[in-house]
Amino acid sequence: MLSMRKIDRIRSLYYDEGMTMTDVARRMNCSTNTVSKYVKATDWSPKPRKARYDYNNKIIPYEEDMKSLLQKERNGHYKQRITGTRMFELLKELHPDFPCSYYLTKKHFLKVRREFYSLNKQYIPLVHNPAKAQVDFADFYYLHKGEKIQGHLLVIAFPYSNAVYCQAYKGKSGVCYKG
């Protein structure tokens, strides 16, 4: 589909300037069929797709078998786990009248496997509460009158607001550690 800018230009050349479809096609570097399509168009809303038959209904009864086979292989080496091809072969062996194609089995198996192994990879969200701070001390070197001196840096970070406070000290003493 062409951009709306190009479509508007095609319609403008045809309707406003009175050019023929062939001349518009030459000028816009597209075919006369394209020009005809956009000149005759009145409704620009996208057409809804036709509902297709859902072939996944055929494989749903075998999903539990897939999960049980995955459970058996769970503790094995990750390179020895079941592939889509192997799952198709195992289901054919378990059910001689298995009605699904290789492609459908593989497609559904990838979804089941992703859900099966994603249970191990759950994360706790990081929460930064207001009025909480993180404090750290670090060493650094700086030049003072041409002399390299070791300094100490106190960094206080407030993750809730992303504010940072830094203070450099010449030495580490008990006064610096008190807060």
Image: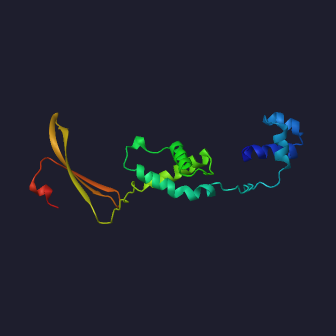
Left or right: 135 with respect to 28? Answer: left
Residue 35 lies in quadrant: top right
Q: Where residue 112 sits: x, y (%)?
A: 51, 53
Left or right: 137 with respect to 160? Answer: left
Left or right: 137 with respect to 57? Answer: left
- Which residue appears farthest toward the bottom when viewing the image? 130
Say which residue appears at 27% left-offset and 60% top-offset. Answer: 133
Left or right: 41 with respect to 159? Answer: right
Q: Where residue 10 sits: x, y (%)?
A: 81, 43
Say which residue appears at 36% left-offset and 49% top-offset. Answer: 75
**Camera-nearest residue between 116 and 34:** 116
Quick one: quadrant of the N terminus?
Answer: top right
**Camera-nearest residue between 54 and 98:** 98
Say which residue appears at 46% left-offset and 45% top-offset. Answer: 82
Residue 75 visible here: yes
Q: Where residue 11 sits: x, y (%)?
A: 82, 46
How is the protein colored in the picture? rainbow
Vertical placement of 144 versus 90: above or below? Answer: above
- Which residue appears farthest toward the left when viewing the image? 174
Quick one: quadrant of the C terminus?
Answer: bottom left
Residue 18 lies in quadrant: top right
